[in-house]
Amino acid sequence: MTGNAEFIDNFALPGMLHAAILRSTHPHARIVRIDAAAALALPGVHAVLTGDDMKKWANPVVTAPEGWGLHSLAVDKVRYVGEPVAAVAADSRYIAEDALELINVEYELLPPVPNAPAAIAAGAALLFEERGTNVILQRDYRWGDIDAAFAQADRVVADSFRWNRVGANPMETFGCVCRWDLVDNVLTCHGAYQTPRFIALGRAFALNLPTNKVKVVSHPQGGGFGGKGGPRGTDIAALLSRKADGRPVKYIEDRIEYLLAGAGQSWDRYYEASLALKEDGTVLGFKVKLLDDQGASAEGYGTISVAKPLAAFTGAYRIGTAYYDLTVVASNRAPTYPYRGYGPPPHNLVLESLMDIAARKLNLDPAEIRRRNYIQPEQFPYTLPSGNEYDSGNYPAVLDKVLAMADYAGLREQQAQARAAGRLVGIGVASVVEPGVFDWNAYATVGVPGVGVPEGVKVAVDIVGNVTVVVGFNWQGQGQYTVAPPTPPRRTSARAAAASALPSPAPCWAPANYSPKNFPASSPT
Amino acid sequence: MLGACQLLTEKFSRVVAHLMQTTPDQIELMDGRLRLKANSAVGMTLAEVAGTMLARSDLLPPGIDMNPEAAFVWSGPNRNIPDDQGRCRSYLTAAEATHVVMVEIDRETGRTAILKYCVVDDCGTRLNPAMVAGQLQGGLAQGVGAALFEEYRYSDDGQPLVTTFMDYLIPTIHEVPIAEKGEVVTPSPVTPLGAKGCGEGAIHTTPAVLLNAINDALAPLNLAIHETPASPHRIWKLLHARNT
């Protein structure tokens, strides 16, 4: 630990102003009037941004499916508590915060849509009136003859599950310093960006700039996990800079803002699911009905989150048929965002819970019912009913090893003794497949416009033999240094297997972070 | 990375072969030099090759791309288009893990204590085992949060009830066990280094295994919880609703 990392809050540009954001206190309301004259008159205030500026200069943020997004600062109505309504750039954050108190917003309250069941209830208020519905996406996937599987079953277990909102909480919240160069019409955004290229593209579309006029510079991150992906802070700081004659504007999200409506809320789901089984525990079919609450905007690409389970829908098991019915809705909760895993954790909870419910019904040990259903080592490559192909694995060997490590039989004995003494002791077993290295083709079926590519890498040698490696995404602990180490790998370093293709010692070895000018092709994470 | 280095090595080998009046297959890259396989004393350093490419176009093989760099984007073989039911090869590798845990629920507080946590995972070739262990432990911590504590609560009229860490409970070192970890290694046949993903597997599994253990603990009471987080408050309500 050197203390040399330049986290965004420690970064400053000459003439920099500080932003503060006034946020909606209502989940759903029409904005009748905003009076910001007193705020603008406060000494030290250089710009006040409201919905009128957004109408002139900005577009709703990009969403998937398209057309379910908001402006980064509310235009005409608010759709969640914490939605930005006005923003101030001032000489200090203190002055900016004081100025917020001088802004008067007159609201006309609308009936709220507090959750997903309310969103699909008859007569529900509409978040996007022009859409005529709160349903963002509704479709089903039928893989094989699911009805026959359930008809043939000796036993069907079914239950409903509720996964409440959770999300990423990195040590460092979002922050940025944006400068809109009014001479060249170039926007430069410094920040704790996880996905610089994605952010740059989105800013170009939202702020009416050519894509090659947006530069995004990623700073070291105090954690990410999906929580740094929001467009609002950047758009607001950028437009404040534009309004403040091109002076740089810093916005640092505080923890209350992050928890209220940052990019850290994910997976707000209601499930009904069932398994069809034979008496010996063989699973014949798996049905899942999902109601997913995206919150007030689909800007977090949440349809990816509901579609990602397709990649491992039936988990570690040979389940021949499956059915997935999904309904994705908008509500007056904060917009949801990607979180580590990007969707499967709730799905796995449902499948693994049903496996245990079935085991209990059939009087099988939870480890045993899993073993009976595992895909076998010789069956790889194995194609799931949902279409993805697993490359390899040895699930029985993994189970054997972990049962031995845990002394599973011994644990069961301890449990029996504890239960006899009246204690509530339980043992859990769960087997899960983690799909890795995505190529986005399955997401085309849920309205995601782009088909991405896995990460690209550029290696360059300069005239004196220095080697530079450029990767397309920011360091967040995923191990880029293993394959692109900051010092030349020694040939004997077998772990740096990829890097050993290049010589050692090279005079210099400089892994470079993403920069739009030196590498265009990269996926968003 | 490997692909880009291979492309660059091929390009450099063409230059060196041209200068040494041989063919690229006679050139090998070793110890920072591109040298003749037949006579390792004869070769050029990376700097000499790059310098030649950038400064002596007259010495280069005709038609070569003179830029001493290479970019590479890898994807797995046999990519295909999804059918109308979304079926396609969308992810390239499948890592797997089984977690085994033992928990105890405090009847008075509803609080779940994790008594034992074991993980065996197979993420293919482990390029950096310490990194794999770190990813696993970090994902496990977030999984404990999702399973037992964390929740963005909203009121029935749409007001968020969480604005500080007093309301949004993040597990600490006291709540997150350091898992006993083991591995099975089935190298991926599709990735160049045999590695699979490992950053998300623990958060994929931890909430499921903890809820399974909690429901195993509650089973003698004929109780079950199918809502996350299985917070102390939620479990306490479940236990005490039964008693009233």
Image (tube, coloured by chain):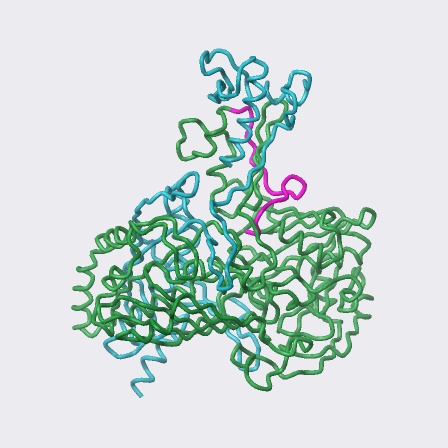
Chain colours: A green, B cyan
Q: Which quadrant holds residue A468? A: top right
Q: Which quadrant holds residue A344? A: bottom left
x 50%, y 17%: residue: B35
Residue lying farthest to the bottom in this orientation? B244
- In the image, the segment drawn in magenta is A506-525
x 68%, y 16%: residue: B58
Which percent across, then down, holds residue A303?
54, 64
Q: Is residue A400 above or below residue B207?
A: above
Q: Main secondary structure of the magenta part?
A: loop
A371 relative to A329 in the view: left or right: left
Residue nearest the viewer, comparing A459 with A377: A377
Q: Which quadrant holds residue A313? A: bottom left
- Report whether residue A317 is seen: yes
A23 relative to A392 in the view: left or right: right
Q: Look at the image and tell me in which quarter the C terminus of chain B lies.
A: bottom left
Which percent across, then down, holds residue A57?
78, 61
Residue nearest the viewer, comparing A275 with A57: A275
Count of residue discs: 0
Which percent across, then down, holds residue A290?
46, 72
Please say whether residue A523 is one of the residues in the magenta stretch: yes
A47 relative to B224 in the view: left or right: right
Residue nearest the viewer, comparing A377 with A263: A377
A423 relative to B53 in the view: left or right: left
Please say whether residue A368 is one of the residues in the magenta stretch: no
x 55%, y 63%: residue: A337
